[in-house]
């Protein structure tokens, strides 16, 4: 790190109620912790900061207000000054003037992102008490870089907005009271990156490799996903982080911990799937996509088209929605717009992230990445956050998908795979890029992340904007493309390994070695062929019996058989296949290289195993030639003997002819039977065709009915949406605080005005009303609500709040359209004016 001695840098974010939490936190940090702490708090920009003096009373550690280009030292606390942002390079702090207007500034996110970019796995982020969601995106950046994230337990915080936002986003590694967090940080830093070598820097040993293989096996067993094709550096960083959290010294100890605690497998799985994403990440790339690439794609289809796009590794959906918004903005500049539409398929391995993407609800701090114009046009403010508008949501379809194992989308005009390839091994990248080429239509665009390239596949893609990683699919590759589809990409590595340090060498045994030796030295030459004579497998040396035919390569046994062998094969092979028996042809003279060789040919039809059924095995066994004196005596034999030999040869020929005749007769009968079966089959197919035609007409009719029903349902949905909007506006226009409870007195719905009486947020739906903090001095509220449920008699009382406001609290039964009592409705009418008038009348009467 620029020649500096590394030490942990801890970013601490706090807001409302943060002073108390900071005092609790730093009162438990030892003076010699060896760490530097940077405190980021929401401060009034118009007042001088007094936080250093206030914190200095609670700790012995020196507390300093951060200055521009100030070099941090361990065992020091640095506090952000008012009206400034803090950046970090190495261990040097830099002051930055905020650009966003007051109220939209997110200084915690800003510093946490800088901390993650600079410190990587050494970054540590802490979120304490505060309102809003500042810090959530920053914690995501820290976790993406394998840093440590800690959050104050919401129950122990004065305001739980910031802690709950981080916890709901699934970004908290450790959740504990502020007084316990320093101990967790110290234990973590004393175990991994700061007092020894990281796992990647340690020498590769058999034991460590076996432990990593067992981690992969546990992940594969519990999740069904194989991470052995991911980069080892990424895997080791995530494992080392988990080891630090659980205070484990060796990877083998972590494997045992995973075996003893199956929930840890799920935690590691989610760690490996942390998505590197945000709205309009790398703005320069999105600007080029909007100004050049998308208009170019639309210009390729002047008559209009429904474009298809695939966002691989979409995480929580920001990338997919950014693409839909950008397309909509481009479309708004084209006339007529109705000719074009976009369908975005967004996929990710993490099913939980996909589900959150479908919800399309994001914290308010996305304002740091989304311009105010886009925020007002494409997002709807709901409670404590923003939801993507319906028009953009309808353009995107989300689905879980494993890009390594599952089939890809095809006929795509745009494929966005950003910041995913960097986590995959080089071999897997080389297989995925041809797959992306296959998925795109000619002229389609590939959109990669800023740290990703197409490698050596310059013949598959032409750079459009190489600086921002935009590439166009070439019309025709300058080499043959071997596309390996996902089912072939995925191969589960074997656990059967040598124990001698040689990775990847199969463990051989005595039996296999002995079998190999016997085959090479004693087994006769043999050939495995199909029923039509095509050679499938050759064992041993078959050059004396077979030779390639001249001309185009032909691996058929009849074309390759040497002189004297072809005729015997023509007789023996059909018989062996038909009757599944062994046929032997003895003393066949086969010519080769100007000489000849006597052989016995054994032909055996195969029935088992099933994989070889219908094939035949040919075995060639050499036979010794008769001795020389026998040949001489044969030449001197009397004429009668010669005649006898010729008669035997003639008899053999007759037998062969008879065999051929019988085979032809059998074949004729089989053909006749087959012809009858084909005629019967033809009639059945004709009948089936008529049935299918009828079914097609029925399906067409059913499809038309379904389309009608679909239109009706869509109309009902639109009516329901309109009614919902009318109801919402009606409730808001009455300016009445209203809370709807179910029959167990849990919150079902509430109006915006109710948040001035109860500390309600959207996530409180489903929680008991008794758990919600209220300003009302009304201890009998729960009992009165239950009484209304029991008697169905309205309750109406005048209740005062802690700050002196008066409300008329009316409790009524909640009736459904079917006249079923399903809870209560509580309305709060502000009667403060009436109470003040009554008081004035009493004073005037008494006067």
Image (cartoon, rainbow, N blue to C red):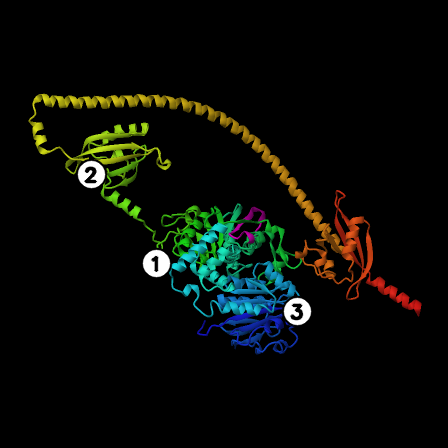
Secondary element under disc 1, as helix, strand or loop, is loop
Q: In this rendering, which labeled residue sits more in front, label 1 or label 2?
A: 1
Between marks 3 and 1, how big is the CA–CA gap? 57 Å
Number of on-image labels = 3
Find disc 2 in the rendering and name its residue.
544
Residues at circles 1 and 2 in contact by the CB criterion of under 8 Å:
no
Mark linked to residue 17 = 3
Mark linked to residue 315 = none
Q: Left or right of 463: which side holds 657?
A: left
Answer above or below: position of 80 versus 313: below
Q: Quadrant of the C terminus?
A: bottom right
Circle 1 crowding by C-alpha within 10 Å: few under 14, some 14–19, many from 20: few
Between marks 1 and 2, how big is the CA–CA gap? 44 Å
Q: Position of residue 530 (x, y in %)?
A: 32, 34
Circle 3 crowding by C-alpha within 10 Å: few under 14, some 14–19, many from 20: some
Give me the residue at 19% from left, 36% from top. Answer: 622
Mark linked to residue 501 = 1
Answer whether residue 349 is magenta in the image. yes
- Quadrant housing residue 162: bottom right
Circle 2 crowding by C-alpha within 10 Å: few under 14, some 14–19, many from 20: some
Q: Earlier in the sequence, mark 3 or mark 1?
A: 3
Q: Which residues are magenta?
A: 333-352
Q: Earlier in the sequence, mark 1 or mark 2?
A: 1
> Relative to the observer, which residue lies in front, 773 or 123?
773
Secondary element under disc 3, as helix, strand or loop, is loop
């Amino acid at each position: 790190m620029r020649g500096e001695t590394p030490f942990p840098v801890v970013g601490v974010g706090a807001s409302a109620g943060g002073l108390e939490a900071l005092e609790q936190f730093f009162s438990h940090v030892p003076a010699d912790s060896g760490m530097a702490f940077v405190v980021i708090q929401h401060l009034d920009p118009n007042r001088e900061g007094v936080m250093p003096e206030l914190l200095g009373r609670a700790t012995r550690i020196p507390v300093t207000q951060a200055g521009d280009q100030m070099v941090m030292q361990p065992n020091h606390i640095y506090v952000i000054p008012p009206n400034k942002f803090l950046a970090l390079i190495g261990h040097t702090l830099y002051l930055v003037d905020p650009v966003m207007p007051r109220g939209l500034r997110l200084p915690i996110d800003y510093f946490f992102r800088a901390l993650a970019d600079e410190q990587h796995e050494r970054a540590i982020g802490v979120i304490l008490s505060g309102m809003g969601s500042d810090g959530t995106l920053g914690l995501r950046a820290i976790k993406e870089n394998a840093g440590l994230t800690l959050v104050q337990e919401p129950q122990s915080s004065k305001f739980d907005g910031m802690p709950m936002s981080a916890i709901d986003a699934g970004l908290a590694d450790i959740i504990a009271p502020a007084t316990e967090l320093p101990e967790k940080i110290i234990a973590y830093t004393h175990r991994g990156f700061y007092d020894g070598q990281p796992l990647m820097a340690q020498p590769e040993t058999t034991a460590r490799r076996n432990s990593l293989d067992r981690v992969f096996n546990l992940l594969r067993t519990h999740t069904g996903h194989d991470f052995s094709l991911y980069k080892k550096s990424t895997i080791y960083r995530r494992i080392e982080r988990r080891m630090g959290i659980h205070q484990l010294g060796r990877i083998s100890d972590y494997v045992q911990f995973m075996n003893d605690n199956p929930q840890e497998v799920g935690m590691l799985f989610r760690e490996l799937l942390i998505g590197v994403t945000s709205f309009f990440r790398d703005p320069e790339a999105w600007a080029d996509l909007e100004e050049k690439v998308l208009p170019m794609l639309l210009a390729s289809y002047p008559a209009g088209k429904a474009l298809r796009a695939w966002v691989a590794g979409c995480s929580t959906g920001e990338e997919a929605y950014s693409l839909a918004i950008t397309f909509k903005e481009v479309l708004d500049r084209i006339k007529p717009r109705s000719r074009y539409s976009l369908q975005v398929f967004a996929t990710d391995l993490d099913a939980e992230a996909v589900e959150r993407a479908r919800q399309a609800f994001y914290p308010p701090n996305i304002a740091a990445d989304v311009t105010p114009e886009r925020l007002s046009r494409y997002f709807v403010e709901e409670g404590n956050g923003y939801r993507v508008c319906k028009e953009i949501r309808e353009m995107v379809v989300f689905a879980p998908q494993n890009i390594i194992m599952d089939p890809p989308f095809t006929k795509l005009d745009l494929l966005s795979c950003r910041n995913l390839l960097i986590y995959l091994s080089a071999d897997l990248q080389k297989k995925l890029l041809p797959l992306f080429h296959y998925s795109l239509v000619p002229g389609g665009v590939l959109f990669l992340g800023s740290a990703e390239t197409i490698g050596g596949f310059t013949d598959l893609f032409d750079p459009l904007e190489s600086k921002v990683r935009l590439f166009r699919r070439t019309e025709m590759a300058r080499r043959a493309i071997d596309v390996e589809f996902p089912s072939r990409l995925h191969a589960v590595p074997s656990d059967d390994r040598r124990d001698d340090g040689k990775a990847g060498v199969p463990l051989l045994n005595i039996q296999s070695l002995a079998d190999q030796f016997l085959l090479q030295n004693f087994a006769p030459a043999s050939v495995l062929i199909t029923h039509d004579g095509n050679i499938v497998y050759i064992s041993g040396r078959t050059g004396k019996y077979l030779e390639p035919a001249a001309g185009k390569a032909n691996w058929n046994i009849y074309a390759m058989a040497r002189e004297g062998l072809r005729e015997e094969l023509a007789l023996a092979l059909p018989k062996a296949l038909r009757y599944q028996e062994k046929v032997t042809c003895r003393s066949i003279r086969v010519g080769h290289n100007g000489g000849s060789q006597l052989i016995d040919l054994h032909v055996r039809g195969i029935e088992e195993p099933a994989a070889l059924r219908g094939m035949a095995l040919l075995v060639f066994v050499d036979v010794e030639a008769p001795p020389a004196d026998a040949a001489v005596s044969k030449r001197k034999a009397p004429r009668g003997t010669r005649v006898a030999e010729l008669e035997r040869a003639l008899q053999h020929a007759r037998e062969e002819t008879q065999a051929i005749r019988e085979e032809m007769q059998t074949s004729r009968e089989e053909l006749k039977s087959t012809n009858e079966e084909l005629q019967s089959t033809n009639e059945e197919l004709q009948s089936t065709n008529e049935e299918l035609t009828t079914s097609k007409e029925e399906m067409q009719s059913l499809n038309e009915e379904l389309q009608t029903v679909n239109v009706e349902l869509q109309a009902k949905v639109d009516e329901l949406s309109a009614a919902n909007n009318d109801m919402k506006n009606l409730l808001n226009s009455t300016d009445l605080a209203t809370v709807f409870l179910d029959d167990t007195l849990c919150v079902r719905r509430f109006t915006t005005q109710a948040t001035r009486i109860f500390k309600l947020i959207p996530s409180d739906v489903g929680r008991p009303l008794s758990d919600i903090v209220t300003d009302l001095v009304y201890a009998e509220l729960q009992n009165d609500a239950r009484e209304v449920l029991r008697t169905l008699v309205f309750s109406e009382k005048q209740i005062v709040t802690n700050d002196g406001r008066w409300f008329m609290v009316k409790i009524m039964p909640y009736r459904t359209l079917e006249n079923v009592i399903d809870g209560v409705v509580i309305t709060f009418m502000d009667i403060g004016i009436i109470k003040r008038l009554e008081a004035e009348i009493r004073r005037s009467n008494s006067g």
